[in-house]
Image (cartoon, grey):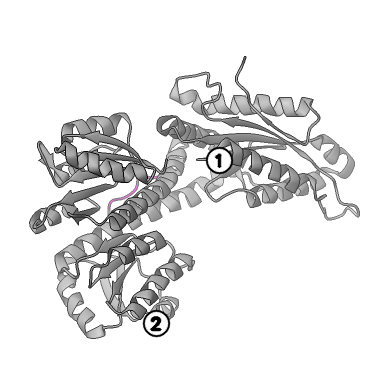
Amino acid sequence: MQGKVLIVDTIATNRIVLKVKLASAYYEVVQAGSLADAMKLVINDPPDLIISALKLQDGDAASLAAALKARPDTQDIPLLALACPPAAPDRLSALKAGVHDVLMKPVDDTLLLGRVRSLIRDHNASAEWRMRDDTSRALGLAEPAADFGPAGHCMMVSTESGRVQHWMLQVRPQMRSKLTHSTIANVLRNVEAAAAPDVFVLIVSPDPEASSATLRLIATLRANASTRHAGVLVLQTTADAGLAANALDLGADDLMTDGFDAEELALRLNALLKRKRRDAQLRANVRTEANAAGHDPLTGLHNRRYAMPHLNQVAIQARKTGRPLAVMVADLDHFKQVNDLYGHASGDAVLVEVAQRLRAGLRASDMVARIGGEEFLIIMPGTLPELARETALRICNQVGATPFEVPGNHNPIPVTISIGMAISGVSAKTTQEQYYGADMLDQADKALYSAKLRGRNRVTLSRPAA
């Protein structure tokens, strides 16, 4: 499944029609007929996205957004609302309350699914940073995210300078942020000359060539180191559902599909600035505050102190969502002989190179930590057993196939590695959240012991007891 979506609508027929569309796109769908029922479901089993009717029998989408924001465990769940036109005042009220977007019926299926993909992708990406921030917080390292910050900088990008300057005059009184303008051709040049904007507003004209250039710019901004974390809002002057969905899939954070509206644009920009500011602080917490206490000084990998709380956070999330999780314990074979034969300095050099090879064999979402002298922990969220085993075998080959060149030694040092692997849900021994991670580590440890007994330089998967 691509994610869990909660549909909230008083009318059962509306829920069924929407469920069919989402289920055919491989989303898990749950339903609620009221705001009260929706909150019960959200608290018990949080979804990745909520799609709500703008009006409900016991409230509206704005009330649902407020209820979500009032709880720390639900405040980050994205909310998409569907409305029957005309609904301009209610639409703006919903956006002010924290609803991510309001789509007007009849909703184009391409745009709807594009919006769903984008919101769930952004939610999951932020959730990973929040989980790592929770780990830092458990270590007593991170400060709470502040709900305020500098005014920010928004750059409006368009080929029509005169019209955009007029729009900026209407938006400026409603924002604290600096507003500037650039053409598509000069965006990167302007970024190189000054600090990158916090948010780009890409204005799409009806001209096919210009709209294609705008879409290409989204990909360019996401690939550029100085702009990849900036917000991107696409403003369409002419509605085009296919182009809108394409923009979201390329990495746009938000859309305005019905042309310019000063109040709506200001609302969306302020919300986007707030989200980007919070995400930036989460990344800073993880990268700086946890760095000293949570890293091994020799290899630069996370250490056991950081890895164990993080493993438990990931294991809890895997149990709650039913998503797969692979945990590996990797141990260098006969490493004491390396230290005895070549010296501890050479042994340290081997450990540093092993850490580099491990990192090279993993995805950005995976985590590797040094948890003992020559022992490493690998955490792979969202990983099916087949892919986990392929990765483990590749790591064995990356370590064992090429001997290690160590300064001061004329001959390369041959080293192999053994790996024990555990998969979430296999032979789980505890129902207590605080022990989920320790349970998986214990399974992986036993699988590692089996790999050592069977001759080393191999991968062994934990099996349920008979």
Mark positioned earlier in the residue sequence (1 or 2): 2
282 w.r.t. 385: above or below? below
Residue where numbered disc 2 is placed: 186
Q: Amino acid at mark 2?
A: Asn
* Residue type, label 1: Met
> Which of 380 and 135 lies nearest the eye of the viewer?
380
Which region of the structure is painted magenta? 143-147
Residue 144 magenta-highlighted: yes
Q: Secondary structure at mark 2?
A: loop
Question: Does the image show residue 292?
Answer: yes
Q: Residue placed at 49% from the left, 19% from the top?
A: 430
Tell me the quarter of the picture where residue 172 sits: bottom left
Residue annotated with mark 1: 380
Task: Please provide percent x and percent y for residue 354.
Answer: 72, 47
Q: Nearer the viewer, residue 133 or 205?
A: 205
* Residue 419 quadrant: top right
Q: Position of residue 135 (x, y in %)?
A: 46, 39
Q: Nearer the viewer, residue 3 or 131?
A: 3
**Residue 247 sits above or below residue 430 on the image:** below
**What residue occupies the far top of the structure in this picture?**
466
Q: CA distance from mark 1 to mark 2?
A: 41 Å
Q: Is residue 321 magenta?
A: no
Q: Is residue 68 visible in the rendered structure shown here?
A: no
Q: Secondary structure at mark 1?
A: strand
